[in-house]
Image (cartoon, grey):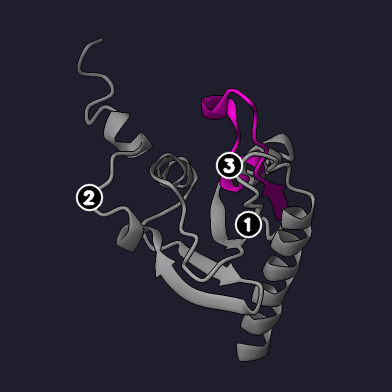
Amino acid sequence: MTDTIGANLAALFQAAAAAKSLAYAPYSNFPVGAALRDEHGRLHAGCNVENAAYPVGTCAEASAISAMIAAGGRAIATILITGDGPILVTPCGACRQRIREFADPGTPIHIAGPEGIRRSFTLEALLPDSFGPDNLRRKNPGADA
């Protein structure tokens, strides 16, 4: 079991690192890569893509989620984010919310640097008391009919 978990994390790390190497980050010079496994066990990766109009750039997590959706996945089983530098590169607030759309509170989020995994969290630890799709579902679907 431990070998399988180790192999799964290694595959996530390799995919995220490969995506990071392709990042388009000419303004920040801070490439980030993300890789996730969907509910079918498939791997999806993405990188950050900056734009001269800063707010319209795309985070690595959003890129990986888009790749998952385009492949037919709808749930994140685990995600790994990697960047360079001495501090943790945790998902920004918007990406935490994006992850929340497709993940459960207990979903593992692994944060890595060039040397490997630095720390692991659950989504709930990074986004406590969050608002997600389940908050928008009616409690009594036929009440208004």
Identity of the residue drawn at 72% across and 35% down: 70
Dot 3 falls on a residue whose secondary structure is: loop
Relative image position of residue 18 (x, y in whole percent): 78, 60
Q: Which residues are magenta?
A: 43-63
Relative image position of residue 132 (x, y in whole percent): 34, 39
Q: Quadrant of the C terminus?
A: top left
For label 3, the residue is 59
Is 101 positioned to the left or the right of 57 in the image? left
Dot 2 falls on a residue whose secondary structure is: loop
For label 2, the residue is 129
Q: Nearer the viewer, residue 8 or 144?
A: 8
Residue 36: which disc? 1
Identity of the residue drawn at 51% across and 71% down: 86
Q: Quadrant of residue 143?
A: top left
Q: Amino acid at mark 2?
A: Asp
Relative image position of residue 2 (x, y in whole percent): 61, 89
Is 69 positioned to the left or the right of 125 in the image? right
Nearer the viewer's eye, disc 2 or disc 3? Answer: 3
Q: Amino acid at mark 1?
A: Leu
User: Does 81 appear above or below 139?
Assistant: below
Q: Are marks 1 and 2 in contact (CB under 8 Å)?
A: no
Q: Label 2: few (<14), some or many (≥20) within 10 Å?
A: few
Is 133 positioned to the left or the right of 26 in the image? left
Q: Amino acid at mark 3?
A: Cys
